[in-house]
Image: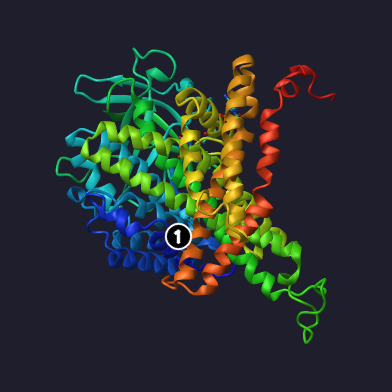
Amino acid sequence: MTAYKVPLRDMRFLMNEVFDYPAHYQSLPNGEDASPAVVDAILDAAAVYCEEVLAPLNTSGDQEGCHFANGEVSTPRGFKEAYAQFVEGGWQGLSFPAEYGGQALPMSLNLLKSEMMGAANWAFNMYPGLSIGCINTILQFGTDEIKRQYLPKLVAGEWTGTMCLTEPQCGSDLAQVKTLAQPQADGRYLIRGTKIFISSGEHDLTENIVHIVLARLPDAPPGTRGISLFIVPKFLLGSEGGLGLRNAVHCGSIEHKMGIAANATAVLNFEDASAWLIGQPHKGLEAMFTFMNTARIGTAIQGVAHAERSFQGALSYARERRSMRALSGKKEPDQVADALLWHPDVRRMLMTQKAIAEGGRSMIYGAAQLADRMFDAAWSGDKVKHAQFDSELGFYTPILKGFLTEMGLEAANLGVQVYGGHGYIREHGMEQIVRDARIATLYEGTTGIQALDLLGRKVLQGTRGQCIRDFTAKMWSLARPVMFTRGPLGAMGRSLARRALQWNLLTLRLMWKARRDREQVGSASVDYLMYSGYVMMAYFWALQAMRAKALLDSGKGAESSDFYTVKIQTAEFYFQRLLPRADAHARAALADAGALMQIKGDSFSSV
Ligand SMILES: Cc1cc2nc3c(=O)[nH]c(=O)nc-3n(C[C@H](O)[C@H](O)[C@H](O)COP(=O)(O)OP(=O)(O)OC[C@H]3O[C@@H](n4cnc5c(N)ncnc54)[C@H](O)[C@@H]3O)c2cc1C
């Protein structure tokens, strides 16, 4: 596989020249320390760690996988050492409070670091990655004692955390959770049940693992309202703050998976394991959903990471591999044939990958600023502001998670295609990217579940279309100054204005249709999500193109004129070649649910 290079130029362009992160950080109470010099140093150091330590373990980790024997899991060669370096570098504590040993920097830095680590080695990234949800949950809902006991080790990275939701009978439908928590006289609970598919649920990287577990109290009402949240350490805590007895939670096996082979996906058996309640009884799902937006954006990043990694591999191959002559005549006459890069169809694939990676990255960088504001409100106890930013982020989340993971998979598949048959062969690593990327559309809520969340909960029920009106107002503001001008930016402005109108009309029409036929929401939802993704990405591409043009004209940008020109040209490609797909999704979303629902269940197949 070609060596991974962190796209620092693009990252800095977004941070400094598109989204003005320096000003954003200065507006945050915990942003003072995130000066441009500090942020630069963090990006550089993270890039070195990712390129030199994590990326070289990506192929070997995939080939070797994790091994399970006698309840213990061993991670692939090199992972322990790489994890030790991660801990030593203080990377886990980047965005967590100083009182628990963190560096108290804004949460966005954690998200941005995650793209680099994920592109270098997604399976590795998941070990510290799952801890983030665990730490956030304890920070927000844990008692002072629980915080004191667990956070310093988790924030240091000396222990890792998990999120245990899924059970054999349910993943999307957590109303069916059966794991039981029996209260004890001493304030503990005993947890009994089986959780499956638990990422990083067992491994040899740290001495302890802290599980956050969804379970029911004996008097719990049925459904999602009867679920509580518990903390269950693998090793109980000893009296002196060290490790005590082994808790009754054991790994029964690990899954043999299509991809992310180096991350252990564990079956965990809780056999009256000692547990402590986190937050209010029966309010566990609500508590878990407090940080669901950021966890899901973390998965959206996986789409971007795989698109970038696959693009880098495909581009280098397309420059080296030669095949036939360009349609417009020989481009490299002294060579036996022209490079793949000269063929329009290969360019279509490469440009699609580039547009997905850079367009997706800009969507993440935009949303990450909202995440900073939401966390700031959460830690300072400002419930009103927290709700406001959470709701705004809540609109972006299903679009980012659903759309970017689907697009990341498309980009990864195109990477294989650019390599031709060689893409299908293990040696070049392109097929690994497809296998690793495939999970992203499934976990943290499948694309189908994201789509229902977007159209059903957020757009129709939650805001009656207000979230669309708010976002399309931004599209209008961006479009207005340029839409009557000539050239590519004018065309983008007019297209954005038309899409703003179309998105609102589509939403209204679906609202009316859903009143007449309740199946319409489910039948339209994935097309609506994909439509929304294409249009939202168009906004972020136009934003990048406009900033690039302004910097090109003023000559005040930090980048070369070639960089800005290519930005505008990639945006043009996006508007001309990818955005039109939105029309097909809009038409499909508006089709009656009848054609989906009319075949009787037992007539589906003639076999
Ligand atoms: C590698 C891996 C790692 C994972 N890591 C974790 C983890 O760390 N912690 C954890 O708790 N879980 C984890 N999971 C579980 C993951 O989150 C679930 O697999 C996922 O949420 C889907 O649930 P399910 O597999 O039960 O599928 P189901 O819920 O049975 O869904 C099957 C299909 O039906 C669709 N569907 C279901 N209900 C509806 C509906 N009402 N309307 C329309 N469509 C519907 C879904 O979209 C999907 O296409 C992991 C899974 C894997 C494979």
Element class at badge 1: helix
Circle 1 is placed at which residue position? 116
Q: Is residue 282 left or right of residue 564?
A: left
| 103 horizontally vs 387: left or right | left
| Image height of 241 relative to 315, above or below | above
**Screen quadrant of the C terminus:** top right
Instruction: Spot the residue most to the left.
Output: 240
Give amino acid for label 1. Met
Closest to the observer, 533 or 268: 533
Q: Quadrant of ligand 1?
A: top right
Q: State whether residue 269 is above or below residue 347.
A: above
- Badge 1: how crowded within 10 Å, few (<14), some, or many (20+)? many
Colour scheme: rainbow
Examine the rendering and report whether any part of residue 261 can be seen: no
Outermost front residue: 484
Q: Position of residue 314 (x, y in %)?
A: 65, 65
Query: Is any atom of residue 531 visible in this view?
Result: yes
Foreground residue among 367 and 217? 367
Q: Give the residue at x 41% y 62%.
A: 17
Q: Outermost residue, bottom direction? A: 334
**Rendered location of residue 412, percent (x, y):** 63, 55
Q: 159 or 239, which is in the foreground?
A: 159
Q: x, y (%) of residue 238?
A: 19, 41
Q: Residue at x 41, y 50 (%)?
A: 127
Using the rendered view, name the quadrant where residue 236 is placed: top left
Residue at the spot 34% in from the left edge and 18% down from the top edge? 217
The foreground one among 383 and 564 is 564
**How many discs appear?**
1
Report the residue at 33% width, 47% height from top.
372
- x then y, percent, for residue 422: 72, 64
